[in-house]
């Protein structure tokens, strides 16, 4: 195994709602902001360095270097939403990098989709600080105060995603409530494959 792992934990906010586009393709929504928490883990998967970065639409070109370097790109519903939303902006092979979608693992273990907020509430005792609908409106307003709120919301979602991922990585389980508000607990395996290597060739 490599001595360290480099991870990118990310979330995407969009400029529009689906009912404004007439399609269900996230690529048509336009990206307003992407927030990344980038970090390095030691061989015991403990964080040794990390920091938050946020990029508004005109700044997106500066963020691809982080994804290029990542051993794992962590998101929540990222393969169905965030990655497709970034398609108009992304390098051609972005979708083929080492993506790790927490929601896919939840669906595999439980058979159904569970919201980030429900997992955060029962696993971490924490919740989202705002809503995706408000995030779109903040972008439309586009004044300094609204953009600051948009950035705060996106970065909070990244922190929740990171903390849920870390909980699953350490404890091999996640907690949430189901459709009937019954507390649930599922086993998850977020570990790296034994053959993981930080020397993987670049796809760019």
Image (cartoon, grey):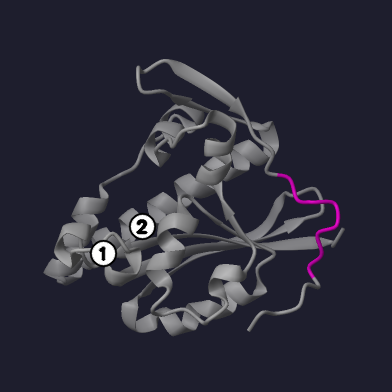
Residue found at x 42% / y 23%: 177
Indicate the quadrant where residue 146 lies: bottom left
Q: Secondary structure at mark 2?
A: helix
Q: Position of residue 90 (x, y in %)?
A: 47, 78
Q: Position of residue 98 (x, y in %)?
A: 64, 63
Most extreme residue toward the front is 23
Query: Is 165 above or below relative to 124?
Result: below
Q: Earlier in the sequence, mark 2 or mark 1?
A: 1
Query: Is 13 above or below relative to 168?
Result: below
**Do residues under tags 2 and 1 come within 8 Å of each other at their CB atoms?**
no
Name the mark on residue 35.
none
Residue found at x 48% / y 60%: 10
Q: Magenta stretch containing residue 196, yes or no?
A: yes
Q: Secondary structure at mark 1?
A: helix
Q: Position of residue 132 (x, y in %)?
A: 26, 52
Question: Which residue is tagged 1?
Answer: 148
Name the mark on residue 154.
2
| Magenta: main secondary structure | loop
| Disc nearest the viewer among 2 and 1 | 2
* Mark 2 crowdedness (10 Å alpha carbons): few <14, some 14-19, many ≥20: many
Q: How many marks?
A: 2
Q: Quadrant of the C terminus?
A: bottom right
Q: Magenta stretch containing residue 11, yes or no?
A: no
* Mark 1 crowdedness (10 Å alpha carbons): few <14, some 14-19, many ≥20: few
Which residue is at the front of the view, 47 or 7? 7
Residue found at x 36% / y 23%: 179
Residue 89 visible, this angle: yes
Q: Position of residue 13 (x, y in %)?
A: 32, 62
Find the distance from the CA under tag 2 to the CA under tag 1: 10 Å
Query: Is 9 above or below relative to 120?
Result: below
Q: Which residues are magenta?
A: 191-198
Which residue is at the front of the view, 138 or 178? 178
């Amino acid at each position: 195994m490599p001595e360290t792992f480099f991870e990118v934990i990310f979330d995407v906010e969009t400029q529009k709602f689906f009912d404004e586009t007439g399609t269900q393709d996230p690529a048509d929504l336009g990206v307003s902001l992407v927030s990344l928490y980038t970090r390095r883990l030691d061989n015991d998967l403990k964080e040794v360095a990390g920091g938050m970065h946020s990029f508004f639409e005109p700044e997106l070109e500066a963020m691809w270097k982080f994804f290029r370097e990542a051993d794992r790109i962590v998101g929540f519903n990222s393969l169905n939403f965030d990655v497709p939303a970034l398609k108009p902006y992304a390098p051609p092979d972005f979708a083929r990098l080492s993506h790790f979608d927490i929601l896919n693992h939840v669906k595999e273990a439980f058979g159904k989709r569970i919201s980030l907020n429900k997992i955060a509430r029962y696993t971490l005792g924490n919740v989202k600080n705002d809503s995706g609908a408000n995030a779109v409106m903040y972008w439309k307003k586009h004044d300094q105060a609204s953009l600051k709120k948009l950035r705060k919301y996106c970065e909070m979602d990244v922190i929740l995603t990171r903390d849920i991922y870390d909980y699953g990585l350490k404890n091999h389980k996640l907690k949430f409530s189901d459709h009937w508000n019954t507390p649930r607990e599922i086993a998850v395996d977020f570990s790296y494959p034994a053959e993981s290597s930080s020397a993987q060739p670049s796809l760019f």
